[in-house]
Image (spheres, rainbow, N blue to C red):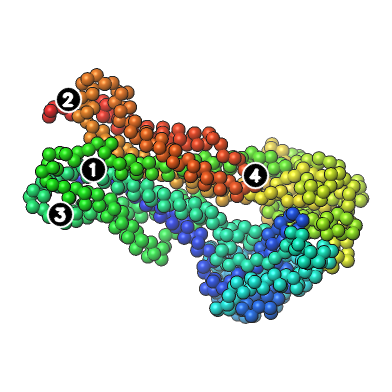
């Protein structure tokens, strides 16, 4: 009550730091908790594949159709396997409307043996055995039938066949790397019986037996590749498997533990948007830093104020108080203040949680189970901080002789506090690291937004699921192109922002020479594709429906031309095997080279690309003018309804799809900015308190200087210089750490903005300015005080 200002700074600073730390802990727990609802999580692995061929590397989360059965029959340690196959969106009939459902997967009947998907209707053993059988989630059953008692009922999918509902499962927990509402029997489609080992269309999972050694399975995978894949591969590349490996190429199956998929896997064809272990580490470090800064503040201010209680200690000792009681008093006071901070922190964390969820894209809730786990840790932390902060006055002051204390010999100024100086340097070093980190992240995001990607994403509208129009898709495109405000349109599902990725083998020589093979992306496009998306032909020509031979023509990108070794690629030929034994070959002729464009994340280098003039009705991309977009959208929707009255028009803008690809970076930037701001606030609270303490300790000195003629700027400089020196030391210490850490982060991008000197200069200037403004308030207040008040007792 006597020191309200210091008490507020102490309590609020620590409470704010603890609250932010708790929010980050909730985030980290949530990220680490993915897929833990599976009771057999420690025995489940996904088997993907890595391929390197003539310099191009592809890593996928998928494998060939026969892989699952072969793994089970070959390895005694494999108890069960299951495959998933994703084929995009479905339309499900409800009344007279067709509702688009994106969370649909074909899977084997064994899915319930491997994953923990509790069934509330139906039998897990038989639910997905029959073709055209489907298991749906509880919420999906209520969505279409207002009940979960739906066994035997049917759903009409894609305006085609009826699918029989054979089971209803509980909704899949949010913390899952896949989140499907419809599980369709894999026996429905012929691809499930495919015997090709060179295709890669199935997500394959294995369940190991209890006690089985996963390393034993991993050691056997190379032999499995050699036995089953080698023969088919040799027919395609015309090279023995051993020579294939000797040439620096490889094809291997890779096991990923289920618990690692969300945070540690970033492969092509993932079943969902995964997290990033790097961000978990970064935010964990930030949580520790913020907590340390808050604790440093608390200890700094506690030790600073403790000198003012020296006389109290002296009087108590004169009156007979034992040292152990003095120690107990100081420690109990410190722990009580810390406990109050902890209670306020809990309320703050609860109040800030909705804002944090909005920034992070999470749906975190503070449940009873979380609190049961976190409260003991908070109590231990309270005791630790309280004891640490109270240890200085408890042990140091209580040990002095009363006569020395009562003479005032312990009243020392700021210069005497080496520990406090060290802690201020520590605080501001962390703050400067976070400021530099925030500037680098925003600089990289700005670079991503401004980079020339090789195509135009502005004012490009993409209508999804045009395949649902069937044979009328091309007619729909032609009618849309005639609308006022439509500049051009292209019919294809392969766009730079669609996230598509597929690999095939294309060869350049008639003899299918092994050294000339190339693993490439193959996209099916029409004659309007390049013009609609604003790409550039740098050699040759575009596709044209005026040339009948364009059905076997291709356009390659610059990367493909380089890897193929073509200095003049026009009118050269590419040969594409049509089966797994190299007996059927299709010939293509190159008519053009398109400038490289980024069709994957800027984290990855541009891969070789082949554009083929073939039908693909996945989507319609429309380049529109910027005038009257709302009216044009309405006209496009009317056109859609004239072709498909029961299906809703689903569309998105290409720039929005691009932004979505970097949503995690954007969220990280916002969170980092928020945490940096809070860190600076907490550090400034401590600096404010220390400046007030220093000014109070030097009140008489300031009074004498004013009497002798010192002006305002002299006194402000006198009180500020000691603190500003510490900030300068912090800049020198923090800069190398920040530079190293952010260079590591930037290396995750193949295309990045290099670290700039002005980032460090701006961060240092900001730290000095913030510190000076914080200190100046107290310095000016002390300089303007009447010297009579401080000197009258002299």
The residue indicated by pointer 4 is 751
Closest to the observer: 271 or 754?
754
Instruction: Report the mark closest to the observer, 2 or 3.
Output: 3
Closest to the observer: 37 or 215?
215
Q: Residue at x 71, y 72 (%)?
A: 223
The residue indicated by pointer 2 is 788
Mark with earlier residue (4, 2): 4
Marks 1/2: CA–CA distance:
24 Å
Mark with earlier residue (1, 3): 1
Helix, strand, or loop for circle 2? helix
Mark with earlier residue (2, 3): 3
The residue indicated by pointer 3 is 323
Mark with earlier residue (4, 3): 3
On the rendered structure, is 435 left or right of 48? left
Marks 1/4: CA–CA distance:
52 Å
Task: Give the answer, above or below, for where 405 lies relative to 236.
Answer: above
Marks 4/2: CA–CA distance:
65 Å
Residue 236 in view of the camera: no
Q: Residue at x 80, y 70 (%)?
A: 231
Marks 4/3: CA–CA distance:
64 Å
Tags 1 and 4 in contact by the CB under 8 Å rule? no
Q: Position of residue 648 (x, y in %)?
A: 68, 55
Helix, strand, or loop for circle 4? loop
Instruction: Report the mark closest to the observer, 1 or 2.
Output: 1
Quadrant showing the N terminus: top left
On the rendered structure, is 224 left or right of 363? right
Q: Position of residue 509 (x, y in %)?
A: 88, 55
Residue at the outermost top position: 709
The residue indicated by pointer 1 is 305
Instruction: Report the mark closest to the observer, 4 or 2.
Output: 4
């Amino acid at each position: 009550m006597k020191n309200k200002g210091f008490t507020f700074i102490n309590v609020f600073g620590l409470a704010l730091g603890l609250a932010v730390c708790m929010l980050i802990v909730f985030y980290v727990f949530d990220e680490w908790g993915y897929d833990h609802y599976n009771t057999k999580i420690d025995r489940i692995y996904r088997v993907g594949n890595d391929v390197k061929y003539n310099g191009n590397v592809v890593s996928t989360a998928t494998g060939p159709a026969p892989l699952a059965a072969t793994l089970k029959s070959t390895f005694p340690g494999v108890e069960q396997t299951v495959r998933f196959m994703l084929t995009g969106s479905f339309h499900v009939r409800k009344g007279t409307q067709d509702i688009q459902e994106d969370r649909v997967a074909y899977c084997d009947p064994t899915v319930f043996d491997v994953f923990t998907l509790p069934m509330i209707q139906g039998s897990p053993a038989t639910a997905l055995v029959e073709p055209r059988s489907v298991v749906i989630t509880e919420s999906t059953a209520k969505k279409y039938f207002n009940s979960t008692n739906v066994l035997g009922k049917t759903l009409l999918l894609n305006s085609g066949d009826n699918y029989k509902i054979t089971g209803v499962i509980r909704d899949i927990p949010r913390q899952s790397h896949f989140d499907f509402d419809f599980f369709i029997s894999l026996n429905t489609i012929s691809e499930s019986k495919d015997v090709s080992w060179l295709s890669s269309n199935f997500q394959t999972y294995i369940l190991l037996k209890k006690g089985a050694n996963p390393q034993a399975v991993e050691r056997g995978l190379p032999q499995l590749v050699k036995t089953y894949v080698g023969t088919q591969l040799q027919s395609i590349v015309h090279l023995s498997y051993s020579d294939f490996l000797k040439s620096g190429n490889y094809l291997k199956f890779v096991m990923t533990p289920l618990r690692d998929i969300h945070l540690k896997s970033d492969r092509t064809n993932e079943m969902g948007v995964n997290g990033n272990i790097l961000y978990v580490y970064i935010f964990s470090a930030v949580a520790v830093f913020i907590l340390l800064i808050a604790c440093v503040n608390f200890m700094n201010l506690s030790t600073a104020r403790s000198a003012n209680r020296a006389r109290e200690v002296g009087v108590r000792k004169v009156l007979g108080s034992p040292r152990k009681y003095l120690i107990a008093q100081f420690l109990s006071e410190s722990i009580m203040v810390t406990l109050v901070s902890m209670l306020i922190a809990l309320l703050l964390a609860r109040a800030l949680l909705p804002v944090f969820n909005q920034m992070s894209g999470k749906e975190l809730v503070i449940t009873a189970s979380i609190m049961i786990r976190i409260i003991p840790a908070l109590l231990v932390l309270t005791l630790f901080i309280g004891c640490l902060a109270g240890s200085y006055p408890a042990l140091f002051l209580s040990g002095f002789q009363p006569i020395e204390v009562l003479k005032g010999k312990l009243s020392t100024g700021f210069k005497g506090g080496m520990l406090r100086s060290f802690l201020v340097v520590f605080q501001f070093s962390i703050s400067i690291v976070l400021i530099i980190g925030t500037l680098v992240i925003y600089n990289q995001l700005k670079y991503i937004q401004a980079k020339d990607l090789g195509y135009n994403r502005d004012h490009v509208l993409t209508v999804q699921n045009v395949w649902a129009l069937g044979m009328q898709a091309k007619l729909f495109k032609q009618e849309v192109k005639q609308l006022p405000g439509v500049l051009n349109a292209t019919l294809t599902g392969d766009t730079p922002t669609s996230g598509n990725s597929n690999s095939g083998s294309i060869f350049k020589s008639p003899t299918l020479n092994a050294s000339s093979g190339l693993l490439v992306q193959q996209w099916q496009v029409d004659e309007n594709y390049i013009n609609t998306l604003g790409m550039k032909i740098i050699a040759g020509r575009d596709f044209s429906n005026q040339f009948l031979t364009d059905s076997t023509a291709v356009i390659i990108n610059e990367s493909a031309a380089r890897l193929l070794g073509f200095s003049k690629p026009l009118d050269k030929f590419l040969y594409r095997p049509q089966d797994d034994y190299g007996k059927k070959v299709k010939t293509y002729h190159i008519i053009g080279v398109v400038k490289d464009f980024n069709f994957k994340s800027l984290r990855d280098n541009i891969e070789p690309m082949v554009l083929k003039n073939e039908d693909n009705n996945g989507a319609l991309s429309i380049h529109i003018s910027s005038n009257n977009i709302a009216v044009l959208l309405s006209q496009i929707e009317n056109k859609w309804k004239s072709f498909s009255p029961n299906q809703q028009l689903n569309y998105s803008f290409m720039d929005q799809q691009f932004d979505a690809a970097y949503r995690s970076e954007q969220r990280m930037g916002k969170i980092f900015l928020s945490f940096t701001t809070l860190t600076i606030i907490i550090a400034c609270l401590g600096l404010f308190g220390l400046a007030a303490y220093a000014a109070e300790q030097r009140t008489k000195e300031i009074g004498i200087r004013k009497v002798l003629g010192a002006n305002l700027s002299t006194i402000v400089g006198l009180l500020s210089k000691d603190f500003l020196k510490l900030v300068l030391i912090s800049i020198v210490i923090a800069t190398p750490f920040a530079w190293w850490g952010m260079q590591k982060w930037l290396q995750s991008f193949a295309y990045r903005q290099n670290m700039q000197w002005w980032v460090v200069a701006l961060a240092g200037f900001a730290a000095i300015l913030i510190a000076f403004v914080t200190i100046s308030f107290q310095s000016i207040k002390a300089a303007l005080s009447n010297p009579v008040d401080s000197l009258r007792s002299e």
